[in-house]
Image (cartoon, rainbow, N blue to C red):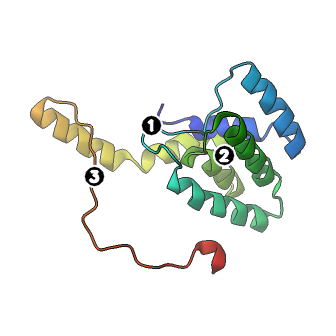
Amino acid sequence: MHGGANEAAMELIERFTTQDEAERVLMQLLKDKAKIMGFGHRVYKISDPRSDIIKVWSKKLGEAAGDLTLYHVSERIEEVMWREKKLFPNLDFYSASAYHYAGIPTELFTPIFVMARIAGWSAHIFEQRADNRLIRPTSHYIGPEPRKYIPIEAR
């Protein structure tokens, strides 16, 4: 499932010119049991915290581009997916419109995803080969307590 979800999300989002059109077609896709990419996550069960950050940037980039159509369509799709399926957007969903607004061609979304992860994936391979055992890494934060911060949208 790694790679390609933001491309599929972009293909869905850019089909629509209005929020109402997006909702109407999405309802039919859900009725037809179509796979809607960019929602849910294997590890994050309540929400994907990365999605909140990229959503803010999608909006900012859309404002800078002078066209929030894709952003507003994305918001409606998010609303429908939550209302109908209780699924939240993951990082891939809003990264699609953010990449688009940044001028990145859709066919480069997956290569960008991969470039950002090659070092970590390579480290996993080295570790797995050393013990000839598949590793499913987990992490437990042991650093300082969280500090207060000002959300991006309040700056």
Q: Indicate which disc residue 105 carries.
A: 2
Disc 3 to disc 1: CB gap under 8 Å: no
Question: What secondary structure is marked by label 2?
Answer: loop
Residue lying farthest left? 131
Callout count: 3
Question: What secondary structure is marked by label 1?
Answer: loop
Left or right of 92 in this view: 10: right
For the residues labelled 3 and 1, the Cα–Cα distance comes to: 15 Å
Task: Report which residue position mark 1 lands on.
Answer: 42
**Along the line of sight, the residue nearer the viewer: 36 or 99:** 36
Instruction: Please determine whether, in this image, residue 81 is positioned above or below residue 98.
Output: above
- Estimate the x, y position of residue 101 in percent, counting from the top left: 71, 56
Q: Amino acid at mark 1?
A: Arg
The residue under the point 69% across, 38% down is 81
Instruction: Answer with the quarter of the image where residue 88 lies.
Output: top right
Which of the marked residues, 2 or 1, is nearer the chain's N terminus?
A: 1
Left or right of 23 in this view: 33: left
From the image, state whether disc 3 or disc 2 is nearer to you: 3
Question: What secondary structure is marked by label 3?
Answer: loop
Q: Amino acid at mark 2?
A: Pro
Q: Amino acid at mark 3?
A: Ser
Task: Report which residue position mark 3 lands on.
Answer: 139
Crowdedness of circle 3 by 10 Å Cα count: few (<14), some, many (20+)?
Answer: few
The residue under the point 64% across, 63% down is 57
Q: Indicate which disc residue 151 carries.
A: none
Disc 2 to disc 1: CB gap under 8 Å: no
The residue under the point 48% across, 43% down is 45
Report if residue 17 is visible in the image. no
Instruction: Answer with the quarter of the image where residue 26 lies.
Output: top right
Report if residue 53 is visible in the image. yes
